[in-house]
């Protein structure tokens, strides 16, 4: 059958086809390289019902927000220093997480947010929190209204349980933690009491 294409047009078609094949391969490779992270904890990425930021004072007296920790994954836990079980267990767990992360631990910031600012003074937080890891920061709301706001923003429950004296009370509170990625976006809710390994896995995903 005679060739009816004008001279020089067939090579142009062949070149175009090669270009399309190369572009398709590039797209497939890009898709493979951008697979969605598989987390062990609860993925709350884009969840509009959770807080996106906070304003709290650290145990050194510096007012902080999530923007101060840009470039680091931030683990945010709500508790209180007089807590007999959940809080020290969680803090010890996060200490183990930092140990297992190795050099990557320097890219993680743990924040302990007190739900009991009445007793948890700046000085007490400065003593209690770094005892688990010197890099950890204790955080205080400025007043009751600030505590109520941050608790509402992050859907954290807390309530005072009276004891044998006015100062001998306990605090019921939520036991999970939140994780922001290095860009400052809220990404994960960490379940309490699962051990360090799932947390290490997820933090490495966010840091990669």
Image: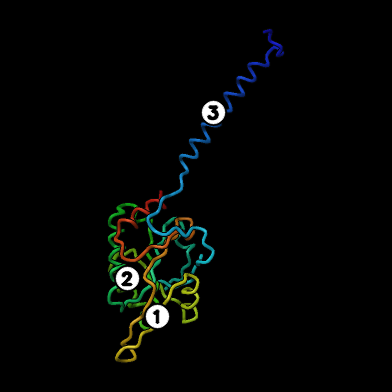
Considering every residue shown, the one lying at the far bottom of the view is 165
Residue 126, relative to residue 169: is it above or below? above
Residue 18 visible in the displayed image: yes
First in sequence, mark 2 or 1: give its number: 1
Residue 73, relative to residue 28: is it above or below? below
Badge 1: few (under 14), some or many (20 or more) residues near its Cα, within 10 Å? some
Residue 140: percent from the left, percent from the top? 42, 75
In the picture of the structure, the residue carrying the numbered disc 1 is 117
Residue 43, relative to residue 160: is it above or below? above
Q: Residue at x 36, y 74 (%)?
A: 79
In the picture of the structure, the residue carrying the numbered disc 2 is 129
Which image quadrant is residue 193 in? bottom left
First in sequence, mark 1 or 3: give its number: 3
Residue 83 marker: none
Considering every residue shown, the one lying at the far top of the view is 2
First in sequence, mark 2 or 3: give its number: 3
Q: Residue at x 31, y 87 (%)?
A: 168
Considering every residue shown, the one lying at the far front of the view is 1
Residue 201: percent from the left, percent from the top? 35, 53
Badge 2: few (under 14), some or many (20 or more) residues near its Cα, within 10 Å? many
Numbered disc in front, either 2 or 3: 3
Looking at the rendered structure, the secondary structure element under dot 1 is: loop
**Real-space Cα separation, disc 1 to disc 3, in angstroms:** 61 Å
Q: Nearer the viewer, residue 41 or 60?
A: 41
Residue 44: percent from the left, percent from the top? 47, 60
In the picture of the structure, the residue carrying the numbered disc 3 is 22
Answer whether labels 2 and 3 touch (C-beta < 8 Å): no
Residue 45: percent from the left, percent from the top? 49, 58
Work out which quarter of the rendered image holds the N terminus and state it: top right
**Real-space Cα separation, disc 2 to disc 3, in angstroms:** 55 Å
**Real-space Cα separation, disc 2 to disc 1, in angstroms:** 14 Å
């Amino acid at each position: 059958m005679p060739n009816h294409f004008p001279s020089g047009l067939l090579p142009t078609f062949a070149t175009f086809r090669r270009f399309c094949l190369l572009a398709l391969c590039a797209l497939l490779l890009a898709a493979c390289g951008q697979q969605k992270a598989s987390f062990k904890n609860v993925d709350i990425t884009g969840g509009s019902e959770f807080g996106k930021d906070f304003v709290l004072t650290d145990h050194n007296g510096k007012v902080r927000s999530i923007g101060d920790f840009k470039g680091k994954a931030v683990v945010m836990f709500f508790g209180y220093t007089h807590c007999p079980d959940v809080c020290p267990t969680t803090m010890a767990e996060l200490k183990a997480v930092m140990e297992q992360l190795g050099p990557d631990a320097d890219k993680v910031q743990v924040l302990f947010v007190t739900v009991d600012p009445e007793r948890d003074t700046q000085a007490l937080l400065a003593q209690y929190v770094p005892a688990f890891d010197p890099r950890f920061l204790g955080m205080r709301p400025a007043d009751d209204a600030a505590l109520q706001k941050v608790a509402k923003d992050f859907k954290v429950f807390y309530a005072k349980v009276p004891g044998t004296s006015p100062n001998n009370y306990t605090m019921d509170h939520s036991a999970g933690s939140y994780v922001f990625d290095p860009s400052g976006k809220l990404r994960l809710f960490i379940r309490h009491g699962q051990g360090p390994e799932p947390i290490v896995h997820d933090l490495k995903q966010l840091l990669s």
